[in-house]
Amino acid sequence: MARLPVAAVLPALAHALESAGAAVLEAPPGAGKTTLVPLRLLAAPWLAGRRILMLEPRRLAARQAARRMAQLLGEKVGETVGYSVRFERKVGPATRIEVLTEGLLTRRLQNDPALEDVGAVIFDEFHERSLDGDLALALCLDARDGLRPDLRLLVMSATIAGEEVAQLLGGAPVVRSEGRMFPVRTRHLPQPREARIEQAMAEAVRQALAENEGSILCFLPGAGEIRRTEAQLGRLPSQVEVHALFGDLTRERQDAALLPAPAGRRKVVLATNIAETSLTIEGVSVVIDGGLARRPRFSPRTGMSRLETVRISRAAAAQRRGRAGRLGPGVCYRLWAAIEDMILPAFDPPEIAEADLAPLALELAQWGAPPEALRWPTPPPAAALAQAHSLLGELGALDGDGRITPHGRRMAGLPLHPRLAHMLVSAIEAGLGATALALAALLAGRDPWRQQRDPDLAHRLALWRTRQGGDAAALAELERVRRQLAGIVPAARGTPEPAQTGAVLALAYPDRIAQRRGSGPGMFRMAGGRGARLDPLDPLAREPFLAVAELDDAGADARILSAAALREEDLLLLFGERIRTEEEVSWDRRSGGVTARRMTRLGALVLKERRIDRVDPALLRAALLQGLAESGLDALPWTPAARSLLARLRFLHRHDPAAWPDVGDEALTASLAHWLGPWLEGVRRPADLARVDLVQALRALLPWEMQQALDRLAPGHFQTPAGSRLAIDYEGASPSVGVRLQEMLGQDRHPAVLDGRVPLTLELLSPARRPIQVTRDLPGFWAGSYVEVRKEMRGRYPRHDWPLNPLSAAPTRRTKAARERS
C-alpha cells in the first residue's frame, strides 16, 4: 500500500482533518485514494473508535471498494470493512469502514441526524455530482453546523474544482496527490457522421485486438448499444472473451466483467460510463471510447424524464482514457476526430440540474429545512423543485404549506421513489399490497423480461408468478429485491394478482392515467394533459383506460414503454375524491359559437359528457368573449357601416389620442368585455352574433357630445355640390372619396374634414366612374392638369360637360341632353 502515490500526502491529509475538520483531496485515477485513505484514517486519534462512512456513486463501485480493502487487510467483507447498497448489506459488529451508496447516507441521516457512531464521512468520486451525493453533502454540512461540529468531512475526486468545494466546506484545506498514471497513447479514429456506434465500435475492437496486447475496455452509451455491439463482433479469436458491464446486469455478471482474464486469454469489456471511475478492471491496457453517454433529462413542464444520448465532457474523456494507464502503458482509441476534443464541454452537468427532484423534495421536507437554508454545490432549480412539490402534494406527502404529512413520513421510510412508496403504502390500505410490492420490486429493480418489448406490466407479473421466460439471473435478483421489501413492509406479503396491476399502478402515476382518444387504437391522453401513444397492433392499444409507468417523453405524443389496462370501476373506486363534475361553457372554433356541457373529469380526462341547454348568462358571455378574443376581431359581424365608423374613430384617435378612445385591434380585443359585453345578451350561436349591432356598440364608447363631434369632425359622407351623398373612406393614410369630375365643377375651395384641417383626397372620376385624377388641391387641378384631362375626355365623353373654364361652370350629375330636355 505504501507504494500507492496517495500515501505521500496522507500525513498532510490527516493533519487537515485534525485541524480543520474537513478537507478536499484531489488525486488522479490510480493514486489509491479509494482503498488507502479510509484504511489509514482508522488510526486517527479523533476517530475514537467510531466508524468511517465512505460514499460511492454506484453499487458496483461500493462492493468492489469494500472487497479490495478487505483483501488488503486479509479479511472477508463484513469484518473491519463492509458495504451497504440498496437491498444488500454486509457489515458486522466489528465493522469500522462502511462503504455505501450515497442515497443510503441520506436515509441514515434522517434516522440519526447526529450520526453518533460515525467519526468521518468520505465522499469518493465526488466529481460525478450525483443528486444523492449533493444532497448527502448538504445534509452533512447542516448536521455538522448544528449537531456534530466534530464530524470530519472529506471530499475526494480526480477532476473537481477543489477550491470551490473547499469554500463550500468552510474554507477547508485542499490536498493534492500525484497519480500513478502510466503513459497512454491516444489515437483518433473519426467516424462518418452517418455511421452507427455499434458498427464503429466493433471495427475498432478488431483493430485494437490486432494491434495490441492485453484486455480492452470499450465505452458505449447504453445497454442497447452494448448488445448490438456484441452482435456486430460476431466470432472473435477463441482466446477472447466478451463481457458486458452496465447497471441493470446481475451482480454475478458485473463481477465477472471485473475479474482478470484467465492466463492466456484476453477480455473485451463493453461498458457504460459505470466503468469511468473507481472500478479497476484487471489486465486492461486498451480503451476504446465511443464519446457518448446516456443521461436522464427531466422536464418540469411534462413531469417526465427521458434518456438522451449526449457527447461526453473533456473530464469524462480524460477519466476514460486514464483507464488504459492504471496498470501499465496503454493506448486509448477515440472514435472521433482530434479537433473535436476542443468542442467537448469541460464537465458534465451535475445531476441536480437535470433530474426529477421529487425524492430530494421529500427528503428535505422530512429533514425540516427549506432548500435555501442548506449549502449546496449547485442549488436545486426552482422549476423542477416546484414540480416536485406539486407531485408530492398530489400524492399526499406534503400538506398545503409544504410540510410533510404522516403519509409522507411513511413514504420516506421506504427505499423507493416517492411514486412507488405512495403506491405501496396506499395499496396496502386498499388490500392490494402484494401486487404493489411485486410492482415496486419490478419497477425499482431489473426487469427480466425487458427484451421482450411487451409494454404490459400485468403480463410481467403473470410470467413472474409462473417463472416463465426471462433472464434467470435477473429473475433471481428480482426475487431478492422483493424479499428485501417484504422485510420492510410485512403487510404487503402475499401472492400478486396480475388483474390488479392497472389499479395499483395508477396509484403511483395518477397524472399518467391515460384515456384512449379518437376512433383508432393506440392514441391516448393522460390525466396530466400530455398525449401518449402505443403501437396500434399492441393489445393494450384498444383499452379504454391505461395506467402508464414509463414513457420516452419524445415528440408531441410520448411513446408508452410500460403500462397496464385500467378498469373504469377501479378508476372510480380509487380516485373518486379527485373526480369532479362541472359545467363547462366554452367557445367552439368550428361552429363559431358557444357550447355548454356537463363534464365528469379526472384531471384532463373526460370520463362522461353531455350537452346542456340552460346556462348561466354570465358564464355564456364570458365564454363568448374569450372565444372572440382568441378568434380575433374578424369573427365579429362587421357591416360596411360598422367598418366605416371604426375607421373614422381610428382617424380621430390618430389626430387627437388624448380626446378620442383607442380602437385599434389590440385595444378593442383587450376591452371586449367593456364595449361589446353589454350587447351579447342571449348570444350563443353564429346567427345570434350576426344580429349584434357593432355601430351602436362602438358609438356607446362615446358620450353624447362626442358623438355629435364625431359626425362633425369625421363625417361618414361627403355631400357633393351636385347633391350626391358619397361615403368617405378613412382606411388609408388620409380620408378619401371618389367623385365624378362634373359634380365638382365651379368649386374654388378644396373640401376638408376635422374642421378644415385635413383635406379630403379626391379621386376624380370619369362619367363611367373610372379614375382620371387624384388630388388634394382642387383649385390647383383646375388651373393646371385639367386642361390635358379636358382634351382627352371631351372626345371620349362628348355628351358630358367639359367646360373651358371649370370655375365658372355649374356642378351637375346629368348629361347635356338630359339638362336640355328638362
Image (cartoon, grey):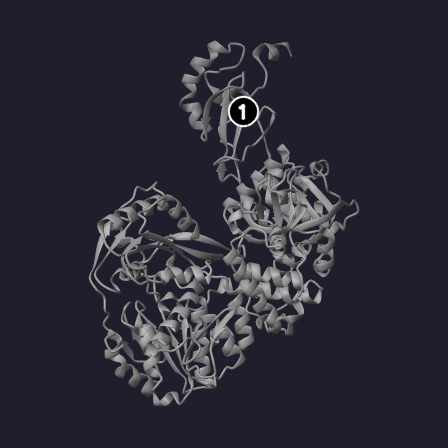
| Residue type pointed to by label 1 | Val
Q: Is residue 392 visible?
A: no
How packed is label 1: few (under 14 Cα within 10 Å), some, or many (20 or more)?
Answer: many
Q: Nearer the viewer, residue 415 or 89?
A: 89
Q: Provide the residue designation for mark 1.
A: 739
Q: Residue 33 appears in which quarter of the rendering?
A: bottom left
Quadrant into which the N terminus falls: bottom left
611 lies above or below 37: above
Residue 431 position, x and y percent, is 71, 64
Q: Could you tell me residue 465's position as x and y percent?
A: 63, 56
Front-most of residues 588 and 538: 538
**Residue lying at 45% horizontally and 30% vertically, measured from the top left:** 777
Q: Quadrant of the C terminus?
A: top right
The answer to which of 529 and 661 lies nearer the viewer is: 529
Q: Nearer the viewer, residue 374 or 567?
A: 567
Tell me residue 673's x, y (percent): 65, 50
Does 737 sit above or below residue 192?
above
Secondary structure beneath dot 1 equals: strand
Q: Is 487 situated left or right of 48 in this image?
A: right
Residue drawn where x is 71% and y is 64% of the image = 430
Horizontal side of 232 relative to 666 (left or right) equals left
